Image (spheres, helix red, strand yellow):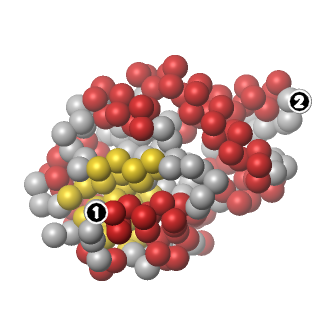
Amino acid sequence: MKCLIFDFDGTIADTYNIVFEIISEIFHKRGVKIPKDRKKPRSMGAREKLKKYKIPRRGVILLTRVCRRHLKKKIRAVKTFPRLKSVLKKLKKKYRLGIVTSNSKDNVEIFLKNNGLNEVFDFIETGNPLFGKHRRLKKAIKKHGYKKFEVIYIGDETRDIKAAKKVGVKIVAVSWGYESRPCLNKGKPDYLITKPERLLKIV
Ligand SMILES: [Mg+2]
């Protein structure tokens, strides 16, 4: 049976605006300038963003941790994307669904419950952002006993595309998250979709 593994932030949960506000606040306190136009960072991949805003590698871990903590206070306000819920419920009937994320299990579980998605996913794997996405993905596939060809990974960032390629699974990039369509296109995903319904056709 096929297994569909989803990234969380930007793929299932619409956290972009909230995370943008959290990061803006952190940066503001440190005197770092960030764009007023919140669409701007969507044109860059994670690596580009780090370079542009001069965030060192160790800063990523700290930033992720602070973000998670702040997000926890606001997680009840986070919604899923329009029509994605019904698509996920349809997919659930035929496939096993999982989540692999660097967000916290608490945040994911609260979100799923609030959005009526708590029965949809068979597993949630969280992990330290220090260890790359590909490792987390690989570990999850092994842990749940799948072969690479049985798995499709769905994510919203260039680093999701890279991770899937490194692991050797098919990748569907979605344009409703943290990165724009042209930006994702550069990463050459197997599929690039702009509407949740497209997922039903691809799998
Ligand atoms: Mg994401």
Disc on res. 165: none
From the viewer's perspective, tell me whether residue 43 is left or right of residue 36.
left
Q: Residue furthest front?
A: 143
Residue designated by label 2: 31
In depth, the one of 54 and 173 nearer the eye is 54
Residue designated by label 1: 144
- Quadrant in the rendering for residue 171: bottom left
What residue is rendered at 39% in x and 75% in y? 169
Q: CA distance from mark 1 to mark 2?
A: 45 Å
What residue is rendered at 57% in x and 33% in y? 68
In depth, the one of 175 and 104 nearer the eye is 104
Density class for disc 2 (Cα within 10 Å; few <14, some 14-19, many ≥20) is: few
What residue is rendered at 44% in x and 58% in y? 155
From the viewer's perspective, tell me whether residue 196 is left or right of residue 162.
left
Residue 131 in sight:
yes
Which circle, 1 or 2, is nearer the viewer? 1
The three-letter amino acid code for the residue at tag 2 is: Gly
The three-letter amino acid code for the residue at tag 1 is: His
In depth, the one of 13 and 63 nearer the eye is 63
Is 151 above or below relative to 51? below
Location of residue 67 in the rendering, given as x and y in whole percent from the top left corner: 62, 33
User: What is the secondary structure assignment of the residue under circle 1?
Assistant: loop
What residue is rendered at 81% in x and 51% in y? 56
| Quadrant where the C terminus is found in the figure | bottom left
